[in-house]
Image (cartoon, helix red, strand yellow):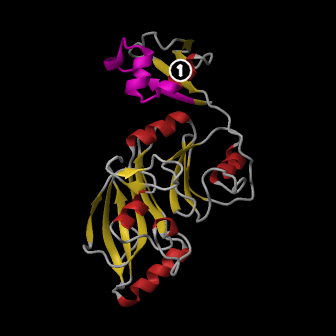
Amino acid sequence: MRELVFNVTAEHDGKQAYHYLRYCQNFSYALIVKMRHTENSLLMDGVPIRTIDRIKAGSVLRAYIPESESFFTPNPELEITILHEDEDIVVFDKPVRMPVHPSKNHQTDTVANYCAARYGNAKFHVVGRLDMDTSGIIVIGRHSHAAAVLTKNGGEKEYIAIVEGVLKESSGIIDAPIDDSDPAVHKSFIAETGQPSVTEYETIATNGVLTAVRVRPKTGRTHQIRVHFAYIGHPLCGDELYGGSLEHIDRQALHRSRMVFEHPISKAVLGFESPLPPDMQKLLDEIRKTEAEKEVIFP
């Protein structure tokens, strides 16, 4: 159970504990309800209080976050590079072809199985998940409050993608609504009924056949990068689902290479980078044979 400590300042004197936690510390409504039903989950100066009670300036408020158990099968043989780890979050460099959660065909080879082996049966919370065949940086909240704050605040994400063809403009913005509301289709699509979706990109290198791009999604729709580039006629290499060819690579050529975000508890600004995996680096090197050398990963 994670303990969070707050020193109540004068500006919050007399507020209900609920109001303070919900609107000043970004606790979710569901978490506060769970705390209401957990004995001694909220203390002021060492004395248990209710969420309807008033807090006092100069007091120390201690909130204990109750967590549900997960029931994933631990797999200690899995290996994932850890970029950062503390009481609240873990930042992984996810390898290619590792799913985040178990499914019918992947029962014990997922990020969830790794977490079960490393952190026990505490439930973990993925923030901004990655597809199985997309590699790179992924953030895990070690408790529901950390995940909720990270989800709300977002942060910046950058990807490297390799697409088919040559883009008409070396940089640009793809602004097209994406609909992922039909689970029977198992894919997203551009539609007026969809959610607003915006993707920025800039060209890194091109050989006239393939183009490597740096991508910054401004929204977080399912398969957004894959759908947007297919929509403008340049599907990702290896992305069969959205019309890409397997001629050059056998999975979608997409890698989350950089993330910057505010830590959900300490508020420190954290930044992480991940190098391209071998299959994408090899393809990029081939593209660059006809181009002057350029930087790929961010300085």
Name the residue tied to disc 1. Answer: 33
Residue 174 visible somewhere in the drawing: yes
The percent position of residue 116, horizontal first and vertical second, equals: 70, 46
When asked about the image quadrant of residue 47, the answer is top right
Q: Residue furthest front?
A: 184
**Residue visible at 52% across and 63% down in the picture:** 134
Residue interval drawn in magenta:
3-30
In this rendering, position of residue 218 left or right of residue 127: left
The image quadrant that residue 36 belongs to is top right
Quick check: 72 left or right of 221?
Answer: right
Please name the residue shown 49% across and 56% down the image: 187
Task: Tell me: residue 187, above or below residue 162.
Answer: above
Residue 201 place in picture, x, y as percent: 32, 65
The quarter of the image holding the C terminus is: bottom left
Q: Residue furthest bottom?
A: 290
Residue type at tag 1 = Val
What percent of the width, then of the height, locates residue 218?
33, 53
Q: Whole-percent x and y of residue 48?
A: 56, 12
Q: Indicate whether residue 70 is drawn in magenta.
A: no
**In the figure, is residue 137 to the left or right of 167?**
right
Label 1: few (<14), some (14–19) or many (≥20) C-alpha neighbours in 10 Å: few
- Most foreground residue, 77 or 132: 132
